[in-house]
Structure formats: structure tokens, C-alpha cells
Amino acid sequence: MKFTGFILALFLSLSGFAQKNYLLIGRNTGNKTLEDSTKIRTFGFARNLNENPPIPGPTLYAKPGDSVTIDFWNVSQGASHTIHLHGLDVDQQNDGVPHLSFTVLHMEHGYYRFKAVHPGVYLYHCHVLSPIHVQAGMYGMLIIERNDSLEYMENGSLKRADFSFPILFSEVDTNWHKDSVLMQGHDAMIHTAKLPKYEAQYFLANGREQNSWTNSPIHKPKGDYLMRLANVGNYAIELDQLPPGSRIVNSDGRDLPTALSLDSSWSIYPGERYDIVFTAETDQNLRFTYRNLNTWKAMGQLIIPIQLFRIGIESNPINQVQLFPNPGTGSIQIGGLNGAADASYRVYNTAGQLMQEGVCENEIQLRGLKPGLYFIELQIGNQVLRERYSLSQP
């Protein structure tokens, strides 16, 4: 048997396919603090017992041909849960609908298995009283990539973006997060519940509200972007401000034979997913309006800024300022400050993540960063200098 297993593993590795194993832990004891300091109780999928379940849950990845197993461990104080693989072609046993497949009870493990086939964006969520449990936070994205996250098909040709990022839309109605609502329906066969009127007060993208996006926008250089969108909320998401030339290349996990040009607004209804490609030559504000499905009334809005890295000096020129040596080992000297007392810096990686920030006088010390390419933003008053910095081994 060991030899057979070795041959099978060797075959899978040589064929490029893999066995992907994920552990998700169902929890009913999560919490989330919203931007105005309001605290709500949440359910969710955690990766370990010490983790407060994040909203959304972890993003799961696979490639075409991979065999995926999700080990779902339910640690939810008596509540039953399932995992529904939304949009994936799975058999009934692995579909996660309680009365058609199986239910995972408290302290039990349930195993969901599927073969990844079609590249695209999918969802997973609990299907026990799903209106309550999804609103509570039991949802996440599942992305089937090609060779990596940058490849996509457009008009029958394989292409490659410069950058990609997923966005999962949802909302929060705090009235639905009270124990009187959340603790209904522990019996998975019950399909009725007392629900308050749904009127969301908070609007999320990747679990983040507007101030979070405003204070920490997407930082990347100009180029071609692959935006992977999904809606797991109860409202429609109207894409009413996208860069010119935006087009849809994949819908609900299927490549479109011909890309759909987005010359006007487009809406993502609950459960839908799209891959959208656009080119960013200047800073962009991506605007998304959350609309009531019955009245089409605008219930909320979220703006996601994309701020492009610029190499060189902005605003009032400060040509006398220099960062050296570059490349370097992390000890960066700043020439030309001339005693400026209000100098600060930020360091971003190539994915646009803020890695380090602080105030500085005549030098910047980078600590704990791996060798590679970074972007350093130096601000002196209202003047900004942005430069590429290559960090080498010490």
C-alpha cells in the first residue's frame, strides 16, 4: 500500500495536479468591532482554535485538476453547520445542503471533497438557516486559478495581468447579530425562523468599511489589473464608477467567449461573481453602491481608492533629497533633509501592503523585511518623494 501511495503521489506531482487540504473551524463565539466602535457577535470560519473567526473567512485556492478536501470541524456549542460550495460542480453529498447531504454537529468533523475544474471565483458558506448564518459571518471566497493569480482568458486567448486582487462584498445589520436572532435554528432540519426587517447599516468589502479603505488604499504601480468580485450580501452591488475600458472576462466561474465591455454601470446580485480587467494609468476611485433589490434604493456606498506608485518627486520639488545606498541592506541614509523636523516615511511591498512606517531624521532602518523590491514614500511637510528600493542580503 505504501508503494501504491508513493506511485500515486509521484503521478500527481508529475502531472502538475495536487491534493489541497484545508481545515476550517466553525465557531459561534466570534466578535467584530465596527468603525464606530459598535461591537457585534459573529459566527465564522477560523483556522485555529485561538483565532477570532475573521469576516470573511479564509480565501481558499486551487488550480484546475487539483483534488480539494475541506476538513470542517464544528466547535459551536451545540449548533449545527454545513459548508455549501456555491457555484462549484460537486455531487449532492458534498453540496452542503443539510437535508440533501449531511450536517456537521458540535465537535464533529465533516469532509467536503471536490475536483477543481473551471478557473474562476466561487463562494463557500454555511447552509443551515443560511440567511442568519451567512449574515453572522460564515462565508468566504474560493478561487480556482490558472498557473497563478494573474492569468486570465480574454476572447479565447490566455493573458496575464500585472496585478490582481479579490473583493468580497457583504453588509451588516446589527439587529441580526443579537442572540435572539443568531441562536435560532440549531436543528438543521428547521427551515423557519423569526427575522427582523433587513436594513443594513454597515457596508463591507473584504470585511472592511469605508474608513479602512480610505486610510489604507490599494497601492500598486500603473498597469493591467484583474479584479475578482463576489457578492455574498443581501443587496445588489452596482458598479457605477470603473476605469474606462473595463470589461468582464469571467462570469460565475466560466470564461466568457467574448469579453463584455463595461461602458455603463453593472450590477452584481447576491451570489454572483465576476472577473473584471482594466488598465490603470492614473489614480482611481472604484465606487460601489449597495442597492435594495425590491426598491433599487441606494442603501450605502463604498469607494475603494487605487493610488498608483509614482517614481520621482511630487508636489513642490525637493530635488536635494536623496536616499542612498540603493540597492542596500536596509540602512538607508537620507541626504538633503537640512534639519527638517516633520519628515516621515512609509515602506510598501510590491503588493501595496504597508510594511513599515515611522518618523526619520537622517536615516531609515528597515528591520525584519525579506530581500526584494520595495517602494519608499518619504513625506516632508506637504512634499512627497517616492522611490523604488532594492533590499539585498546583509
Image (cartoon, rainbow, N blue to C red):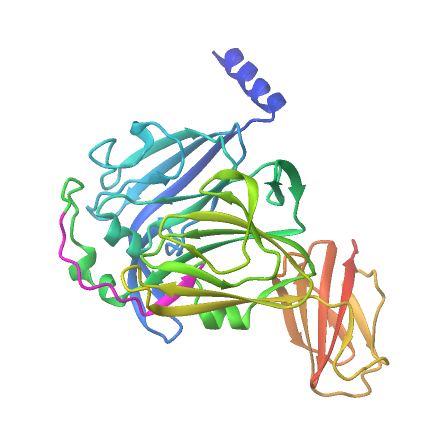
Q: Quadrant of residue 315?
A: bottom right
Quarter of the figure that contains the C terminus: bottom right
Magenta residues, as a range?
Answer: 192-205
Query: Does the segment drawn in magenta span residue 198?
Result: yes
Who is closer to the viewer here, 89 or 263? Answer: 263
243 left or right, relative to 95: right
Q: Is residue 284 visible?
A: yes
Lateral position of residue 30 relative to residue 372, left or right: left
Residue at horizontal 22 percent and vertical 39 percent from the top: 105
Along the horizontal axis of the image, is 100 left or right of 304? Answer: left
Front-most of residues 261 and 307? 261
User: As displayed, is residue 316 above or below residue 322?
Assistant: below
Q: Position of residue 34 (x, y in %)?
A: 37, 69
Which is the main secondary structure of the residues drawn in magenta? Answer: loop
Q: Is residue 213 magenta?
A: no
For the residue pair 384 and 259, the one nearer the viewer reads as 259
Observer-nearest residue: 235 or 113?
235
Above or below residue 92? Residue 123 is below
> Which residue is at a point 60% across and 22% down the rendered structure image?
15
Q: Position of residue 355 (x, y in %)?
A: 63, 63
- Residue 341: % across, % down: 72, 88
* Picture residue at 47% right of the left edge, 39% below the top: 253
The answer, for residue 47, to whether it is visible in the render is: no
Residue sitting at 77 percent across and 58 percent down? 391
Residue 65 percent across, percent down from the top left: 52, 27
